[in-house]
Image (tube, rainbow, N blue to C red):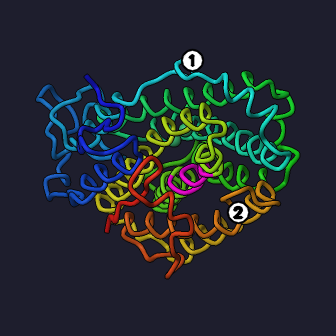
Amino acid sequence: MLDWDDPLGQNTQAAANPAVVEQALASLSKIEVTETTQTKSVQLNGTEPVRADDKRVVNGLTDINQLAPFKYPWAWNYFLNANKNHWTPLDINMSQDIHDYHHKLSDTERHVYENVLSYLTTSDILAMRNIGLAVMEKMSAPELQIYQARQVYEEALHTWTYQHCIETIGLDQGEIYNRYRVVPEINQKIQMANRRLNAVLRADIDLHQRDDLETFVLSYLFFGAVFEGCWFYNGFSPIFALQRRGLMKGTAEQLQYIMRDEVMHCGFGIRTVKQIIVENDVQLDPVAICEMWDEAEACEKAYSSYVLRDPILGYSADEHMGQFRYIANRRARQLGIEEPFPGAQCALPWLDEPGQYSQGEKLF
Ligand SMILES: [Fe+2]
Ligand SMILES: [Fe+2]
């Protein structure tokens, strides 16, 4: 029987813990990306079985309908592991959350709760469109597409989860879903992601062209490492701060399931980007990477200043930003690029201690 506390079966002693998932994925990511001279010789036609060495992440010419032999067994493992974290929002009791929201939360806490949900639900629709419409169709190995098909479903499930929370609590759905359009501090995060999505969603993009390939790599890198790996990963934390005080525990449990998925989405995105870089000898532009981190930080700073304009007990905008920079450095190390915020320390130790919220893995 599946152990929900240890969905990857890596550590039977671990508590319900996204870090367990991330640690397991980190061990996978330590496997060097592979490229062999045989990839230069690509099977074009004929009836011979697909050769694993001929497969490519993008621009491959092997039969996309032949799953095995695998060139990327790690991608298949992501798919198998993703299926161990399955739930529906209806499985989680939200009755105490209804009482908490209406009778226990302060106005400041309600402001935090509503805006976190407003941001997350818009972002998850965007995440679904990105992976389903802009990324998956560019993959030329089926083991990659199959995990991404699961990811598309998971992003839709996340959207259902937020909708279930919003409806159950009794929030004004029209107002909550429209909020990202009228609150500039939420809107600019969405716009940053929209720009990168639209840059690779256009019909005439051609990954055989060096500029288009680099644009695609940067876009996928942003979505995996920043959008999912930092903004989502960090975005749940204010609700976890409420949960630590016994508030909104149903919502927080829902978000913990989502967080496990997002950790895997981030790990898969980073792994895939690294493979594309190796296979195609892509040279990342350090200026473009630096601009991406700077913009992501500026967006997150404005967002946190709005959502946490007044701190709640145990959580402030400054702490949120400190944790963002700390996690951003972790993603950069996973990518094998320079840390954007040297010296950033963990600002919220309770998120980094072994236990329910632990992100305490020391990966690299
Ligand atoms: Fe998601
Ligand atoms: Fe995701």
**Magenta span has 233?**
yes
Can residue 68 be seen? yes
Q: CA distance from mark 1 to mark 2?
A: 31 Å
- The residue under the point 16% across, 41% down is 52
Reply yes or no: does residue 286 show up in magenta: no
Is residue 99 left or right of 319 when viewed as pictured? right
**Residue found at x 81% / y 57%:** 306
| Farthest-out residue, left | 48
Q: Is residue 206 above or below residue 318?
A: above
Q: Position of residue 290 (x, y in %)?
A: 57, 75
Q: Quadrant of ligand 1?
A: top right
Residues 81 and 36: in front is 81
Three-letter code for the amino acid on which mark 2 is drawn: Ser
Residue pictured at 57% horizontal, 17% vertical: 90
Name the residue that disc number 2 marks.
316
Q: Nearer the viewer, mark 1 or mark 2?
A: 2
Q: Which residues are magenta?
A: 229-237
As drawn, the residue found furthest toward the top would be 90
Q: Give the quarter of the image for residue 29.
A: bottom left
Residue at 47% over, 70% down: 329
Provide the major secondary structure of the magenta segment: helix
Q: Which residue is mark 1?
A: 90
Residue farthest to the bottom, as pictured: 343
Q: Is mark 2 within 8 Å of ligand 1?
A: no
Q: Is mark 1 within 8 Å of ligand 1?
A: no
Between 175 and 355, the one nearer to me in the picture: 355
Q: Is label 1 in a helix, a strand or a loop? A: helix
Decide which of 222, 111 is in the foreground and name it: 111
Q: Identify the image quadrant of residue 98.
A: top right
When asked about the image quadrant of residue 101, the answer is top right
Q: From this viewpoint, is residue 141 visible?
A: no
